[in-house]
């Protein structure tokens, strides 16, 4: 690539199968977006004041075997990407800090548009990018975070879609915009999901209630209206995106996970406030992250 890219996709790698999948996925995403790819790994240097830290740390950190292993991993990842995507501009970095801090620092740098990480590290660098890193990033990153599952499943014959969860809260607007843009960029269908549940919890605290209180039809209609109102402006902004609307009688996380196949990109907000049945509450987003069989994008 002759010119320096205007933006970057950042990916964390540790040599595990999960991070190799994240590397491949992030390179494909960078190509779709016309961005460069920044490959990051993390090395936590022992505190020399710690009596259990082991041998003395050399003045030149690059002499540490762990640092050399990290450098070799990045070199291998860079060569692999250049073979598969020779048109991509790539940069590599060994960060001397906690994995989440390393990726957060990269996320906050000008030009970063997306951060990608595997959900479970099992590599040679002490499983650096473990599942908790994805959750921590998703909660605090200023840019969208995509978390790839620890075991990538395939969906033969299934075309990729974007599956979006909405609850009508103002906090979900960025997620809606991201999902529409991704569907347009990929030329795929967008499936918009709103989950609803009967309000049977009231029966546990308030005693017997009239049967009409539990009429499910109004709840389903409210969910449908929530979706239509939430996406109305985005339908106009993205007229070429094919949209399918689904209301599901299920827990929000279960509704999204049952709708999506491993080929799909699930998009959720990091935290909803006051929306329809709290679809985008942090606990739901975390449940989706842990249960998904394909990539999940969390948008603050």
Image (spheres, grey):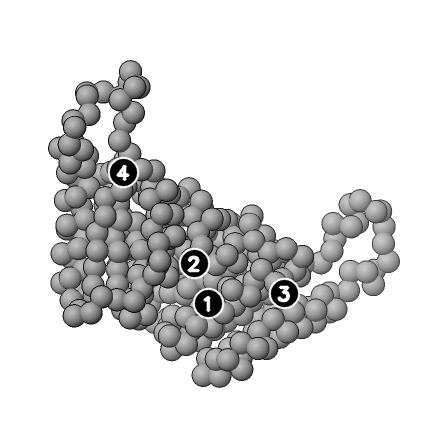
Q: Do the residues labelled 3 and 2 touch (CB within 8 Å)?
A: no
Q: Give yes or no for contact between labels 4 and 1 (Cβ–Cβ under 8 Å).
A: no
* Spatial CA span between label 3 and label 4: 41 Å
**Nearer the observer, 283 or 67:** 67
| Mark toward the viewer: 3 or 2 | 2
Q: Tell me the number on the disc at residue 168.
A: 3
Q: Residue lying furthest top in this view?
A: 51
**Residue 115, numbered circle:** none
Judged from the image, the secondary structure of the residue bearing numbered disc 1 is: helix
Q: Mark 4 = which residue?
A: 96
Q: Quadrant of residue 99?
A: top left
| Number of residues whose C-alpha sits closer than 10 Å to that of mark 3, classed few (under 14), some (14–19) or many (20 or more) | many
Mark 1–mark 2 CB contact (< 8 Å): yes
- Say which residue label 2 marks: 144
Q: Do the residues labelled 3 and 4 touch (CB within 8 Å)?
A: no
- Residue at 67 percent across and 73 percent down: it is 225
């Amino acid at each position: 690539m002759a010119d320096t890219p205007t933006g970057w996709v950042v990916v964390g790698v540790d040599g595990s199968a999960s991070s190799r999948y994240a590397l491949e996925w992030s390179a494909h995403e960078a190509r779709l977006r016309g961005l460069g790819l920044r490959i990051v790994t993390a090395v936590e240097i022992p505190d020399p004041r710690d009596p259990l830290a082991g041998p003395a740390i050399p003045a030149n950190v690059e002499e540490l075997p762990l640092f050399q292993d990290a450098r070799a991993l990045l070199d291998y990842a860079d060569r692999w990407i250049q073979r598969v995507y020779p048109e991509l501009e790539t940069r590599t970095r060994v960060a001397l800090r906690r994995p989440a801090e390393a990726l957060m620092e990269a996320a906050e740098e000008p030009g970063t548009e997306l951060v990608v990480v595997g959900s479970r590290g099992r590599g040679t660098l002490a499983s650096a990018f473990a599942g908790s890193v994805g959750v921590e990033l998703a909660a605090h990153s200023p840019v969208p975070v995509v978390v790839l599952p620890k075991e990538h499943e395939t969906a033969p014959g299934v075309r990729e879609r974007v599956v979006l969860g909405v609850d009508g809260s103002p906090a979900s607007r960025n997620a809606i915009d991201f999902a529409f843009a991704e569907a347009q960029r990929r030329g795929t269908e967008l499936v918009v999901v709103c989950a609803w549940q009967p309000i049977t919890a009231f029966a546990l605290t308030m005693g017997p209630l009239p049967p009409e209180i539990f009429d499910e039809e109004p709840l389903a209609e409210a969910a449908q209206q929530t979706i239509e109102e939430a996406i109305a402006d985005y339908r106009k902004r993205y007229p070429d995106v094919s949209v399918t609307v689904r209301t599901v009688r299920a827990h929000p996380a279960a509704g999204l996970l049952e709708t999506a196949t491993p080929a799909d990109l699930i998009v959720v907000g990091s935290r909803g406030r006051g929306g329809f049945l709290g679809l985008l509450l942090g606990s739901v987003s975390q449940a989706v992250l842990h249960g998904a069989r394909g990539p999940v994008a969390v948008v603050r």
